[in-house]
Image (cartoon, rainbow, N blue to C red):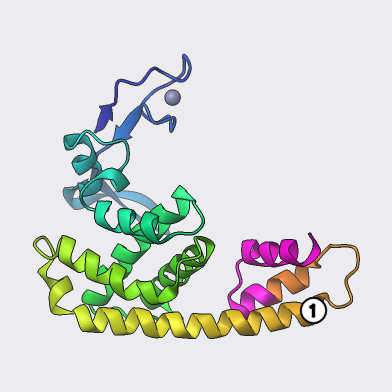
Amino acid sequence: MFYDTGKPACSKDCQPSCNCGKYVEIWNNVFMEYFKDKNGYSKLAQKNVDTGLGLERMAMLLQGKETPFDTEIFKPVMEKLEELQKENYIESRRIIAEHLRSSMMIIADGGRPSNIDRGYVLRRLIRRMIRHLNKLQINLDELSTLIDINVENLKEMYPELEKNKEIIKNTILEEKNKFVKTLANGEREFEKQIKNINDGKIPGEVVFKLYDTYGFPPEVTKDLARRTWI
Ligand SMILES: [Zn+2]
């Protein structure tokens, strides 16, 4: 189900699957009809419809906002980030707001950072959030404040956040400390690796090692390289 925002069509081929922003998908129905195995497809004995609405998108439409980040779900955290930031990147603020809320939900639901399955998803969410806090030059100790703001804002809808507030805080802060250490080790490794490079070109193996062993996504390595050579 799509909502037409009323914006002008981007081209004559503009239609609901276009991602120019004219149409917003708010709901979908998945009709489960087939079973697939090594023999191919066969009809399911029991067919069903799986349906889901995007809460944030519905809130966005009902509140007449441009993006989910302008709704009351994210607004308090978004405003705090704007107040705290020393660099101004709207994309980073949105990533932090989204990842922080998701992380809090997963932890309230019993998830913990690890290197497998959903624990790994959680770890990546927290670490990506921290990279963006760094990008905005926000002191990482503010995470505690941001968590408080989210709990306060969302506790009516999600009482489990308030109930697990201490666990949420401890888990995120502990993962933050681990990641800060990893980043420091990675930077040392980076310094070591680039000693013999004079042409500004970092070999793929180095980029990979930094990613694989130190959890540096290529864009972090790129940022370091920029700082080093420019
Ligand atoms: Zn379009």
Q: Is residue 114 visible?
A: no
Does the magenta segment cover residue 221? yes
Q: Which residues are magenta?
A: 210-230
Quarter of the image that includes the C terminus: bottom right
Quarter of the image that includes the N terminus: top left
Q: Position of residue 158 (x, y in %)?
A: 13, 65
Against 38, residue 176 (above or below) is below
Question: Which residue in the protein does label 1 denote?
Answer: 193
Instruction: Indicate the quadrant of ligand 1 in the picture.
Output: top left
Does the magenta segment cover residue 229? yes
Task: Name the quadrant containing residue 112.
Answer: bottom left
Left or right of 218, for residue 119? left
Which residue is at 49% across, 51% downward?
89
Against 210, residue 137 (above or below) is above
Rate crowding at label 1 as few (under 14), some (14 to 19) or many (20 or more) other CA atoms within 10 Å. Answer: some
Left or right of 27, for residue 40? right
Which residue is at 61% across, 82% downward?
184
Left or right of 27, for residue 192? right
Task: Name the quadrant containing residue 103.
Answer: bottom left
Question: Which residue appears farthest toward the top when viewing the image?
Answer: 12
The secondary structure that dominates the magenta segment is helix
